[in-house]
């Protein structure tokens, strides 16, 4: 059994990690970390866990935890993981960081978009970006995994084959994304109150959302650009808040290169994802809906070419708490420990 | 492996059966029946099942199905199961009926509340009411199970210990229940449209809802009344439609008999449910919320005595599609086939 | 034009007062009070008011406000109005208090249920309980109005004719109420976050909710009991939180006195409400839904007698922010200033 | 008083017309037409109208209606208005058609996108496209108004100043739109059931939605193109269904022409909308949310320039049933009859 510790187990992503690990046949949770609720019973904070989890919430002493755990998940605010990471920890345990601390390879980009000074730049190079379908091989031998963001997982996976195969104009990419409200976290803020979110939709972080450079960096690699040398795809990324608990939908627009057909698009998706367990290709003219992936680790992708405008519209959907956070983290854990990638993740989507 | 056939697999309860059986380690689905969608791919009707279920929808030929299946689930409208049941089928296979056809022992009561002529009254006596926590022993040897209704499971389980132990005035029982909209089924009707249900709550079936006599009958047995001889507890049962997908909450009111304390109430719950896997007793003054049981087979129960009025308020909550329908049906299947009762049902509630 | 000041204009009830007064032909708002947002533009807090309200939020200096305003609405937490009220204010202006400070005539009951020491007990006697349909005459000449609570308005209006006419057993009353989430206010608390409320229903304040004694007191008057002398109806009142913005539904149960027919019930409602503008009697067997009153000042009431149990089930519905708070406050203002009671309140319910 | 008749008064847009006209000081409704509910009481279909509307639903005899009414609103499916319109009617009365029959000037485009043969092509030229802020002058003298679609009103008003002033690349326009579910109408269809829409977001009509050519035509006029001669802007328009009752948000993307600054964008909006009653300009970097316009006739517009990509992101929001349908129809009526444009439309947005 893999011994797993969770720092930040009382946020929504952390709680989803708890749900998934409890149902994982090869893992057990040895540490429910929660700065806000240290000392309280975990099941008092998440009453769905009544009579399932008996543990109390512990603090965030990573050195102690590293002695007990084979893997540590940090489902914490930006900056935390970078402030505590160190060789002492990494020699004892694997770390899967669900925050953005190690997602961006360029410190300057991190500091510009996150308005934070990076506390552990020396570990950035070592960290592997944990987008399983793309980076599987690198993940296998890593000590420190940067688990991708929810919007970014959706956006990158939707666009990757098109960029990788050189089918679209790299200057033309627009991602219009929509997210359920669990993505905003469990912090007590007026804008996240029921009456403020319900019966409304709004854009936010327009041109400034932090997932933008993460998408740009990964797509730049796919395009073969010298990202570290300063080359980069630039995109427009606009997230919207939707009155639902879970789900992300990314509607992606790009201009096709001369002569690229819808069939060619389909072949590209097939080439990269045809054998993937967690990516379901809906085919041309079929589009995903978040309800069909809820509670599961699937990403559903559909697309269509508009001959009138010469653009492809590709749409991806996933559950932001599963494939967009905790599910992908478990998938990374499975790779790290040599388990079949879908261990504990054969979750049938819950509907309605 | 238990071979299972589902008649009515494209209703919400049927689809939930599919979800649960797909994740059940000892069962496989051999028949996806659907009168409305015969011949179509199941995954085209429920796109969450894309690349999970490859089968087409079949019709409702129970004789043929009985040859192939060890157990048949009928998740069909009232009247269907009674119109097709017969010895030929029951000699070959177990039948678990999710409709009301065999829930009521008195034909006259069935016909009065359902406004239907019962087509198979001779099988009523044989049928076992599949409320697992109460009728476990009888279920084990049965051929035909009447799977309880969603409101009734919640209401009966919440009130059973109080009635059985003689703690409350049997004439004083009121059940005010609230249900998510999946309970109304997938029929295309104006009152179930999003804009009609959203942002509203309404009572319906006031004094006439068909789950009323089902609750009354089972509680009458618990009270030791001669129900078949004409004795019966009479209750007020008022269901309400709530703008959410899943969940039932039953708020039950009853006058305490002289001298009954809150402690005594707690002991009664402990006596009957203390060892139950799927009933979680929250204790005095703690009340359930439907979000904490969503997606799981749990029933959460809390209670409180009001010394001012001499009443106990007991509240139960469950997921209407799981413990209120498909989950309990699988639990019944497990009992019928000698499996541990929680096989395939160790579902951690999904939140948020 | 009536000059109106609002203390607590940035809570949901206060904001609804703003909306109603802006559309009132005989009133204008001269003071947008808000302790939390003093100095900020009102339209920055409520962006629906952009280009409609140009004012900044002011503080809560009631003495100063009393000089400017003909009427002051206090949409403030319990205890505030009692702590500032005084003759200086009441000689200059009318006060309509939307909190509970002056709703209960017995200080001991107030202090017991609210766990507060009452700061102005000498004004309790003078204050008039502003349930317009019942207390219209007393309201007309008052200086200080205690605007009723949302649950209480629904519950009392639904039960009043039955109690007043002596048709029901006074010991048998149970009110099972359901409310939209705006009733919980705009405070930033985890239990009111979108993901915590959405897709769930829960009871709260079981046997302890503060609207209980308010309902009991008013119904005791209706029954002709010597409430101040210690006589009182006692009821069970159980509120539930529903995932919707607005609306209250109160499902009321009571045992009928010997020989009382459904027809007699109908006559009683007709007698007291037959000419009321804002009470819509749906008749026997017809029940209200909150969607049909949303945005309006209506209370819809329906009922049914259950001959099996001898009970009447009466259900009332209103919009908690309108007839349950701001609308009734404006109705009180209209009475105080001799205007037709429906001035500014001829609001057609908004659906969907 | 203007005598108004409504054909299709029991759809959501028709019902909103009823709500608005009931509160309009200069109009009265003389005909509640409804093919589906002819002969039934209107208030039985829309119970919010109980004791407000006493009329029965009538049929769709436009000749008879034209004798009684000064203005007829057709809130009917595509094809109806074209099939009944004629000089006899137009000589007696004004017609405001809320369907698409007369919105597109080119019959071939209409027939291509709507898959219908146009029944009255000779009236297309006469019809005036009723986008009030743009076509006010032409509307004033018209007999037949083509009331714009909900998505189109949002999209055109958001983009118009940018196109008109030549600030953006006409080949670069993408509109990613999101709508509440009332836009899907009141037809009883499975995809519009509560459980199908709730907790999900989906794109639909990708590259084929019928509002596309309507937006293209109007923007082509703004750009000075010879639309009838075959010139046209081509855009990508992607609508999404959002789990809320009302509201449309259109997120528009376009590449700026060389040297166009954010300031210049702001000036353009100011130039065309600075004096408009119903368009609220939020300014640079401020974005609309549908909750802030709900129940009102406002369109809120915000924008931002992204210097990294050279694009402007402009976002518009309105209530699809008001400014997107019934409100704009009433605004058109006001213009037709020489009333101040905001008569009966000074609606403060309802929040929450």
Image (cartoon, coloured by chain):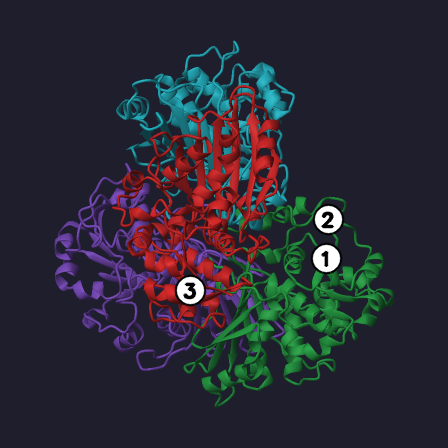
Chain colours: A purple, B cyan, C red, D green
Q: For mark 3, give the secondary structure.
A: loop
Q: Is residue B27 visible?
A: no
Q: CA distance from mark 2 to mark 1?
A: 10 Å
Q: For mark 1, give the secondary structure.
A: strand
Q: Are marks 2 and 1 in contact (CB under 8 Å)?
A: yes
Disc 3: host chain = C
- Disc number for residue C10: none
Q: Residue B312 location in percent, x, y?
A: 35, 27
For the residue pair D330 and A197, the one nearer the viewer reads as: D330
- Disc number for residue C69: 3
Could you classify mark 1 by the number of other residues whose Cα lies within 10 Å: few (under 14), some (14-19), or many (20 or more)? Answer: many
The residue labelled by disc 1 is: D29
Q: Residue at x 31, y 82 (%)?
A: A229
The residue labelled by disc 2 is: D55
Q: Residue at x 45, y 17 (%)?
A: B220
Disc 1: host chain = D
Asked if badges 2 and 3 are on one and the same chain, I answer no
């Amino acid at each position: 059994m893999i011994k797993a510790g969770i720092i930040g187990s009382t946020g929504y992503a952390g709680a989803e990690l708890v749900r998934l690990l409890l149902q994982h046949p090869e893992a057990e949770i040895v540490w429910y970390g929660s700065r806000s609720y240290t000392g309280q019973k975990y099941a008092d904070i998440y009453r769905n866990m009544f009579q399932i989890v008996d543990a109390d919430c512990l603090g965030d002493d990573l050195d102690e935890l590293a002695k007990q755990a084979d893997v540590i998940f940090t489902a914490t605010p930006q900056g935390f993981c970078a402030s505590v990471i160190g060789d002492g920890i990494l020699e004892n345990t694997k770390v899967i960081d669900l925050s953005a601390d190690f997602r961006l390879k360029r410190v300057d980009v991190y500091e510009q978009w996150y308005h934070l000074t990076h506390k552990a730049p020396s570990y950035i190079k070592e960290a592997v970006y944990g987008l399983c379908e793309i980076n599987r091989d690198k993940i296998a031998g890593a000590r420190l995994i940067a688990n991708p963001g929810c919007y970014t997982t959706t956006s990158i996976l939707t666009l990757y084959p098109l960029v990788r195969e050189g089918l679209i104009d790299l200057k033309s990419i627009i991602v219009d994304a929509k997210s359920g409200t669990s993505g905003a976290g469990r912090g007590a803020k007026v804008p996240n109150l029921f009456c403020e979110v319900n019966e409304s939709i709004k854009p936010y972080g327009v041109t400034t959302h932090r997932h933008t450079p993460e998408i740009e960096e990964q797509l730049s690699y796919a395009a073969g650009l010298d990202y570290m040398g300063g080359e980069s795809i630039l995109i427009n990324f606009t997230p919207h808040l939707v009155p639902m608990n879970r789900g992300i939908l990314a509607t992606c627009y790009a201009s096709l290169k001369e002569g690229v057909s819808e069939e060619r698009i389909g072949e590209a998706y097939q080439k990269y994802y045809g054998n993937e367990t967690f990516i379901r290709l809906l085919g041309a003219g079929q589009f995903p809906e978040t309800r069909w992936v809820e509670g599961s680790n699937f990403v559903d992708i559909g697309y269509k070419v508009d001959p009138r405008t010469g653009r492809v519209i590709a749409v991806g959907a996933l559950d932001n708490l599963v494939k967009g956070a905790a599910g992908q983290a478990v998938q990374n854990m499975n790779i790290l420990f040599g388990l079949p990638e879908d261990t504990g993740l054969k979750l049938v989507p819950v509907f309605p």
